Image (cartoon, grey):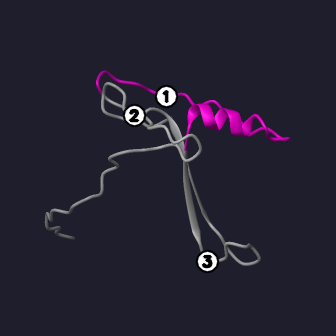
Amino acid sequence: MKTFLQRSAVLPEVADVRCNYCGRDVEKDTTGYFEDHISLTKNWGYHSPYDGESHTIDLCVDCYRDWTGQFAIPPQVEYVEYVWEENERKFPK
């Protein structure tokens, strides 16, 4: 049997999200969550001009739509069913 100690930890909290493309702030909704946006992180490997680097970008919905609208092959889309309970956010089923 394991016994655990309760320890306090300081966890980083996202204070601000800005779109890397247009520079606009991603606003918070009325519940304090950031409006929908996409965050991408790529750890570059061998045979790339960015070998050993990690790049992270955030895009607002408008810039994501504009960017992906230029793709020769559009992103694959799957629809996710969410379960919402009053005053509580839940993960997808």
Q: Quadrant of the N terminus?
A: bottom left
Q: Residue at x 45, y 36 (%)?
A: 26
Q: Secondary structure at mark 1?
A: loop
Left/right of residue 5 with respect to residue 71 in the rendered view: left
Q: Amino acid at mark 1?
A: Tyr
Query: Residue 92 got which mark?
Result: none
Q: How many badges with numbers are in the image? A: 3
From what the image shows, is residue 14 above or below residue 24?
Answer: below
Residue carrying label 1: 82
Q: Secondary structure at mark 3?
A: loop
Q: CA distance from mark 3 to mark 1?
A: 37 Å
- Among the two numbered marks 3 and 1 on one chain, the one whose residue lies closer to the N terminus: 3
- Magenta range is 59-87
Q: Are marks 3 and 1 in contact (CB under 8 Å)?
A: no
Q: Are marks 1 and 2 in contact (CB under 8 Å)?
A: yes
Residue carrying label 3: 52
Q: CA distance from mark 1 to mark 2?
A: 7 Å
Q: Amino acid at mark 2?
A: Lys
Between circles 3 and 2, the one closer to the viewer is 3
- Among the two numbered marks 1 and 2 on one chain, the one whose residue lies closer to the N terminus: 1
Mark 2 nearby-residue class (10 Å; few <14, some 14–19, many ≥20): few
Percent across and percent down for residue 32 are 31, 33
Residue carrying label 2: 90
Left/right of residue 50 with respect to residue 81 in the rendered view: right
Query: Toward which corner of the image does residue 63 lie, by quadrant?
Result: top right
